[in-house]
Amino acid sequence: MTEHLLKILVIGDQNVGKTTFVHRYVSGQFNRDYRSTVGVDFSMKALQWSDTETVRLHLWDIAGQERFISMARIYYKGASGCVVMFDVTNSSSFLSCRHWKQDLDSKATLPSGGAIPCILLANKCDLADRSVSAESISRFCKANGFVTWMETSVKDNKNITEAMRFVNNPGPPSHNYFLLPTEL
Ligand code: GDP
Ligand code: MG
């Protein structure tokens, strides 16, 4: 059995839903009052990729360091995928996504030299008071080199595993990266 270890980053402004997203993805639950912690939170999830391969995802949630805007290079080092998240009801969290993406790209790349694949997540789409339009998200996504973007609601469990398909990328190019492996 071959085991792939993948480091996945989850970045974005404070209060957009990063920690609840990771918790939902890993445990399947929605926590309304998840305490914001200081430093970096690590979560793990194991996936059965094929008959002979498992994938161990290490999710890095920046947890409380959002105020620094610029992260240390070491935080991004070795990442194979990244989730950049904002809150659709908070336009300043959307504007910050440009800084997050630039900060990442200026400090880390894949071993091949290519940019770390990033997906842009427009979270809290269950809320009615949206302040960012789908059109501007789509334009921003293309202009800034994201793999794709999706609306998510961690609250309603919408597009959580679907979003993670785009960042679970275990290596050999013979794999179909966009197929979701079954959970162990
Ligand atoms: P973080 O600072 O980015 O880690 O954000 P948190 O995960 O701590 O979430 C901030 C707040 O947003 C919490 O009260 C969550 O319950 C809430 N939240 C997260 N995702 C959603 C969502 O999809 N919809 C709604 N309505 N609230 C959410
Ligand atoms: Mg958090």
Image (tube, rainbow, N blue to C red):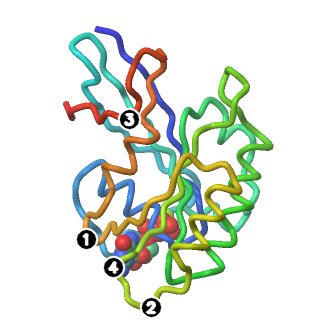
Amino acid identity at mark 3 = Phe
- Residue in the picture at 47% in, 15% down: 172
- Residue under the point 56% across and 73% down: 135
Q: Which residue is mark 4?
A: 126
- Asked if the residue at label 4 sits under 8 Å from ligand 1, the reply is yes
Residue at image mark 3:
178
Of the image marks 4 and 1, the number of the one nearer the N terminus = 4
Label 1 or label 3, whichever lies nearer to me, is 3
Of 93 and 7, the residue lying toward us:
93
Q: Amino acid at mark 2?
A: Asp
Task: Tell me residue 43's x, y (percent).
Answer: 40, 44
Q: Is mark 1 within 8 Å of ligand 1?
A: yes
Q: Nearer the viewer, residue 102 or 5?
A: 102
Crowding near pointer 2: few (<14 within 10 Å), some, many (20+)? few
- Label 1: which residue? 156
- Give, as a three-letter code, the residue at label 4: Asp
Residue 129's label in the rendered image is 2
Residue ranking furthest to the bottom: 129
Q: Earlier in the sequence, mark 1 or mark 3?
A: 1
Quarter holding the N terminus is top left
Q: For the residues marked 4 and 2, what is the alpha-carbon distance in whole angstroms? A: 9 Å
| Residue 151 image offset from top left, x and y in percent | 41, 66
